[in-house]
Image (tube, grey):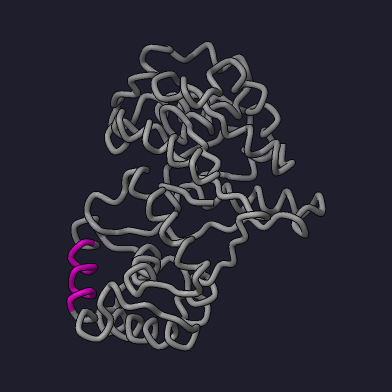
Amino acid sequence: MFFKEQRQNESISKQYSKKMMQKGLDVLVDVATLYRVGMETGLSNPLSIVKSVKRQLVNQQKGTLFAGDVLNGILDELVPPSTKEMNTLSENLKKKLSEKYPDVTELHTKEETKAFVDEVLYFLDTLDVPSRLKLTSDRIVEDQNVEYDKDLDSIYCIFDRDWKSFKEGQYDEVLSLCNQEGYKLIITNPCFEFWLFLHLPEKCLCTLNTEKLAKNGKVKGKSYIEDKLCENLKLLSPPQSYTKTKYDSEFYMQNLVQAISNVHHFSESLLELKTVPGSNLSCLLKELQVG
């Protein structure tokens, strides 16, 4: 599964994996959050990501990787103080590696990939850059060499309907490209917090203003739906809390059936989700037999 916001969705995706393991479905289904490719400016929008996914899968089927893609995967694991500093770090790394490993360089074997990764990690160590996970060349090489069989595997591209990075024309292109390549497109409009909100008791839905939800403007420094989520979580017994980097994913797993029920009050059509609040994430969960 490819996430636009890997860190934000990672916690709950691990809970989905745990749920499948409990049902004995982990033998048939492997849920892996792959590295989001493309750290350059302008590559964070869903259209660019889907195109990058296509390119990465084509390369993997050929048995090759590009040095630039592997580098982007490593950068996505770092915890920089700001996006600006991440961009600076990215450019410095690419400049340092460009002579020996230009972006177009193909890495044909795990040994070649490991040698490249070792050089990147050595440079990061000299800068004392923190990472979310323990970065080792063996783990990174293993993660980058994900096997994909078009006849057996399914690709899910999971995005928020973010008006800032997901322009109207791009939405149509993403939908068309996913249909063309056989990828399964999952959209939540307006954003991930709305999907979390759906896990609350049905009575909480009446606290939402449909017009404000569609616009999802700022309220007290938060988006409208994030503010409503926090507000209603505090009223639960026992109370819950939410921030983008910290929330109780187990609570949402326990109320997953409620979310799948509540979403029926909103749109689940990909064509409608372009402009109307809703989500088709329940389609994925039902297919994985999580819900």
Q: Quadrant of residue 166?
A: top left
Q: Residue 125's x, y, as percent?
A: 32, 82
Q: Main secondary structure of the magenta part?
A: helix
Q: Is residue 13 above or below residue 124?
A: above
Q: Is residue 98 above or below residue 45?
A: below
195 or 278: nearer the viewer? 278
Residue at the extreme right:
24
Q: Is residue 130 above or below residue 116?
A: above
Q: Residue 2's x, y, as percent?
A: 49, 51
241 or 30: nearer the viewer? 30
Q: Is residue 80 left or right of residue 197?
A: left
* Magenta stretch contains residue 162: no
Q: Residue 59's x, y, as percent?
A: 45, 67
Report the number of numbered marks. 0
83 or 73: nearer the viewer? 73
Q: Residue at x 37, y 12 (%)?
A: 211
Q: Residue at x 59, y 23 (%)?
A: 263
267 or 47: nearer the viewer? 47
Q: Which residues are magenta?
A: 87-95
Q: Residue at x 35, y 43 (%)?
A: 47
* Magenta stretch contains residue 89: yes
Location of the C terminus (image quadrant): top right
Q: Residue 283's x, y, as percent?
A: 63, 33
